[in-house]
């Protein structure tokens, strides 16, 4: 039985936390097991759906991410956003167990290695994103996201005022029935995959 199906009582946080720890490597393995060409095709389909669903020009500053462990590469979308007159920013961990900061990025920005050896802008030009494209490891139909367990996005969103509009982007085959959301989990405003998209309604239901 996989960790995905061996799900605990959502009211038992220690059990949920342990379940998520078991589930994350399984999802990473499933993501990387998809052939590179097929995974890229899925990513391109997700990006087409993203651009069909949202006019990113409405958000002057767009926060993105540097692709990691098979995540969908959205840097082409970011470059198009810059060419249309917008700004783009990448998240940078400046302190463990604290919100991240977003540093302005262009294709010419000098880069250095950050946490998990992920490239980050070496110039500290901090901006506040109006919207974020957020990578999904796993996700559910209520627009809750399962990440790598660091909690950086949740802490960042909880500390943001105003909060940026958050669009999770990932692969449909990693959809879960539920991530067993806890009080500290902050849902995405929308989720887009290679075959579906959903926007979270105020009631907490997706449309």
Image (cartoon, rainbow, N blue to C red):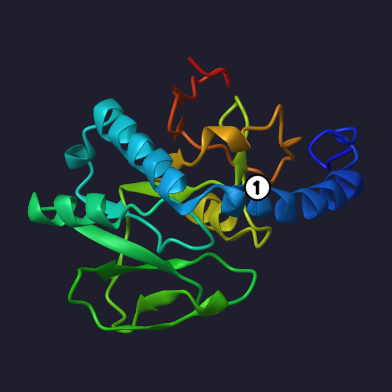
Q: Residues within 10 Å of mark 1 (few under 14, many from 20)?
A: few
From the viewer's perspective, tell me whether residue 60 is left or right of residue 190. Answer: left
Q: Is residue 116 above or below residue 26?
A: below
Please report the residue visible at 27 percent of the width from the left and 31 percent of the height from the top. Answer: 54
Left or right placement of residue 79 versus residue 128 in this view: left
Q: Position of residue 36 (x, y in %)?
A: 46, 53
- Where's residue 28, x and y in %? 64, 54
Residue 136 position within the rendered picture, expressed as x and y whole percent measured from the top left: 54, 46
Residue highlighted by disc 1: 30
In the rendered image, is residue 10 in sight? yes
193 to 36, vertically: above or below: above
- The reply, left or right, for residue 184 in relation to residue 39 is right
Judging from the image, what secondary structure is the residue with disc 1 in? helix
Quadrant for the N terminus in the image? top right
Residue depicted at 23% across the width and 39% down the height: 56
Whether residue 144 is visible: no
Q: Position of residue 32 (x, y in %)?
A: 58, 54
- The residue lying at 36 percent from left, 56 percent from top is 64
């Amino acid at each position: 039985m996989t960790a995905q199906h061996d799900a605990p009582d959502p009211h038992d946080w220690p059990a949920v936390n342990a379940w998520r720890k078991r589930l994350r490597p399984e999802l990473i393995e499933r993501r990387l097991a998809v052939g590179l060409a097929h995974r890229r095709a899925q990513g391109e389909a997700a990006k087409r759906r993203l651009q069909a669903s949202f006019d990113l020009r409405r958000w002057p500053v767009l926060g993105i991410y540097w692709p990691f462990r098979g995540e969908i590469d959205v840097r082409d979308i970011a470059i198009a956003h810059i060419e249309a007159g917008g700004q783009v920013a990448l998240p940078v961990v400046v302190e463990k167990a604290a919100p991240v900061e977003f540093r302005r990025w262009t294709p010419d920005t000098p880069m250095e290695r950050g946490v998990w050896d992920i490239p980050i802008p070496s110039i500290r030009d901090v901006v506040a994103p109006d919207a974020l494209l957020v990578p999904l490891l796993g996700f559910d139909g209520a627009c809750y996201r399962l990440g790598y367990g660091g909690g950086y996005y949740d802490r960042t969103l909880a500390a943001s005022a105003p909060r940026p509009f958050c669009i999770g982007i990932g692969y449909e085959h990693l959809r879960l029935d539920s991530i067993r959301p806890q009080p500290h989990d902050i849902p995405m405003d929308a989720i887009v995959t290679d075959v579906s998209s959903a926007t979270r309604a105020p009631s907490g239901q997706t449309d």
